[in-house]
Structure formats: C-alpha cells, structure tokens
Image (cartoon, rainbow, N blue to C red):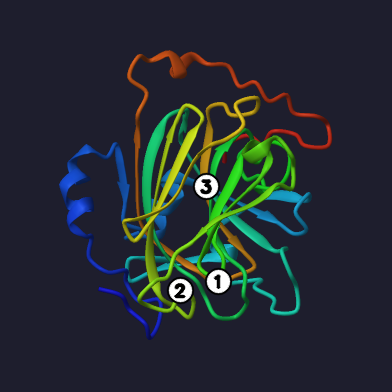
C-alpha cells in the first residue's frame, strides 16, 4: 500500500519483510523522540564541509510513528542544509538494512542512506563520508561518494526503473541495502535496482546514517542486521585517519 496524499505513517511491511523480520538485530519504529535519540546522534551540515553536532529537535520531529525533517529546508538553496542522523549503536562491515522513506515536496532534493561512513555525521560526498544511496526524481538509483569509485564526486546512474506510482510527491517507498565485501546491492520496493562492486581501497567498516539533503522527507521502520559471521570485522581498526580539517566527532 502506498500513501500518495502525504507522508503519513508508512505502509505495512510486505511479505518479504515479514519473512525476515525476526532476523533483524535492531528495529526502530520511531514511536517516540526518546527512541530516536537513544539510537541516533544528530548532526547538521550547512555547506557540505561545515559539520556540527546538533539536537534532534532542531531539524526533526517524531510524530505518529514517523520521523520527519522539519526545520531549515530552504527552496532557494541546493545541496546544502543537510540534516544527518547517524546510527551509533554499531559500525558495520557486512550488513543488510531496510528503511521506509518519503520525499518531501518543498525541494527536489533527497532522502539519502549513508553507508560505510568513517566519521559520524559526515556528508556522504566528502572524505570519510562513505557513500550516499538515493533515488533521484527521475527514478534513478544513485551512489555518490568516496567509496563508489575512489573519487570524491563519483556519480553513478546505473539503472532506471519505472515505478507504478509517482516516485516523488510524498509517496512512501522502501529501500533495502545489502553490503557483503565489495558487493553493494540495492532494492527499492523489493525491485532490484543496483548490484555492483565498489572500490575496496576505502571500503571499510563504518557507520550508517539517515540524511535529508535540504528536503522535508520522512523515515520509518529502520531495520538493520550484521552479516559478519566470523567476528573479524568486530576488531577491524578504523583505517580512516581524520585530519585537523575533518576531525572525528565524539558520539553524543
């Protein structure tokens, strides 16, 4: 079921999600602000390279079981005013995650999932930012960031999928991401839209984040599980060395 009139509570999980639901390590329904603050640390990036720790309520609200970006969405700006929530409970090497999301209508920019991020709260296209995964308004899956090709601004449009519902315009969708070694696979509404190897040079264990790039988007039903089976990733050192210009932030 897809809601087309507004970012109301997200639709019920589908059969595939139901089948694997018991296997998730963590499930977050955004039932309260306290729940969101328990799992996520908030950051705000004003112009991609200027990052600060933030309070969740400065940019987000939790209402009726949905997390929504509210403040500092500016239609006159482009890829700035990025509100970021980093999942701080663990860093992941191999993992699978699922989240429902709904793009807002104030701007044409994106709700983004950040993966393999070396620094909490980093904008995905900057050093230490891992990669950002999102769907453009044209319905194209996009991977952007250092680990995609090893280049900071590598933009990859791999496949266009025709969706039965309008992609934007306050329409709920589900994105599922699976990372195993250098293989990154993405499904949107259970349709496989991307599967390819990414650069291994910078592809290490890292953080997962929900990012709003200047868009009044919403998230719900965040689920994640580790796919590490031998425990080796638990002890892997963080190989990204922060510089004075990009210091690592302490968890809030």
Image side of residue 106 versus residue 74, left or right: left
Judging by the rendered image, the residue that carries numbered circle 3 is: 209
Residue ID at (71%, 64%): 79
| Most foreground residue, 18 or 143 | 143
Query: Measured along the vertical axis of the image, is residue 142 above or below residue 198?
Result: below
Could you say where residue 243 lies in the image, as x and y percent from the top left? 80, 29
Residue ID at (74%, 69%): 78
For the N terminus, the image quarter is: bottom left
Looking at the image, is mark 3 or mark 1 earlier in the sequence?
1
Separation of residues labelled 1 and 2 (CA atoms): 8 Å
Confirm or deny contact between disc 1 and disc 2 (CB under 8 A): yes
**Foreground tag (3 vs 1):** 1
Which quarter of the picture shows residue 234? top left
Could you say where residue 221 lies in the image, as x and y percent from the top left? 33, 56
Mark 2 Cα within 10 Å, few/some/many (few <14, many 20+)?
A: many
Looking at the image, is mark 1 or mark 2 earlier in the sequence?
1
Could you say where residue 66 lies in the image, as x and y percent from the top left? 37, 66
Judging by the rendered image, the residue that carries numbered circle 2 is: 167
| Most foreground residue, 231 or 242 | 231
Looking at the image, is mark 3 or mark 2 earlier in the sequence?
2
Mark 1 Cα within 10 Å, few/some/many (few <14, many 20+)?
A: few
Mark 3 Cα within 10 Å, few/some/many (few <14, many 20+)?
A: many
Image side of residue 52 versus residue 199, left or right: right
Residue ID at (18%, 41%): 22
For the C terminus, the image quarter is: top right
Image disc number at residue 138: 1
Image disc number at residue 78: none
Which quarter of the picture shows residue 226? top left
Helix, strand or loop under label 2: loop
| Most foreground residue, 89 or 144 | 144
């Amino acid at each position: 079921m897809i809601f087309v009139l507004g970012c109301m509570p997200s639709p019920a999980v589908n059969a595939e999600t139901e089948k694997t639901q018991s296997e998730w390590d963590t499930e977050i329904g955004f039932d309260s602000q306290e729940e969101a603050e328990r799992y996520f640390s908030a950051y705000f990036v004003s112009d991609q390279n200027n990052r600060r720790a933030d309070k969740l309520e400065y940019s987000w609200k939790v209402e009726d079981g949905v997390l929504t970006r509210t403040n500092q969405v500016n239609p006159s700006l482009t890829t700035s005013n990025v509100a970021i929530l980093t999942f701080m409970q663990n860093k992941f090497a191999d993992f699978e995650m699922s989240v429902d999301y709904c793009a807002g209508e104030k701007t044409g920019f994106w709700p983004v999932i950040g993966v393999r991020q070396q620094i909490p709260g980093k904008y995905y296209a900057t050093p230490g930012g891992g990669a950002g995964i999102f769907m453009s308004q044209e319905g194209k899956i996009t991977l952007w960031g250092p680990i995609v090709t090893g280049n900071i601004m590598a933009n990859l449009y791999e496949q266009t999928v025709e969706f039965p519902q309008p992609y934007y315009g306050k329409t709920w969708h589900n994105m599922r991401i699976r990372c195993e070694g250098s293989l990154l696979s993405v499904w949107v509404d259970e349709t496989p839209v991307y599967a390819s190897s990414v650069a291994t040079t910078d592809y290490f264990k890292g953080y997962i984040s929900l990012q709003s790039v200047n868009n009044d988007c919403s998230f719900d039903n965040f689920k994640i599980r580790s796919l590490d089976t031998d425990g080796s990733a638990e002890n892997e050192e963080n190989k990204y060395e922060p510089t004075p210009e990009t210091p690592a932030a302490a968890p809030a």
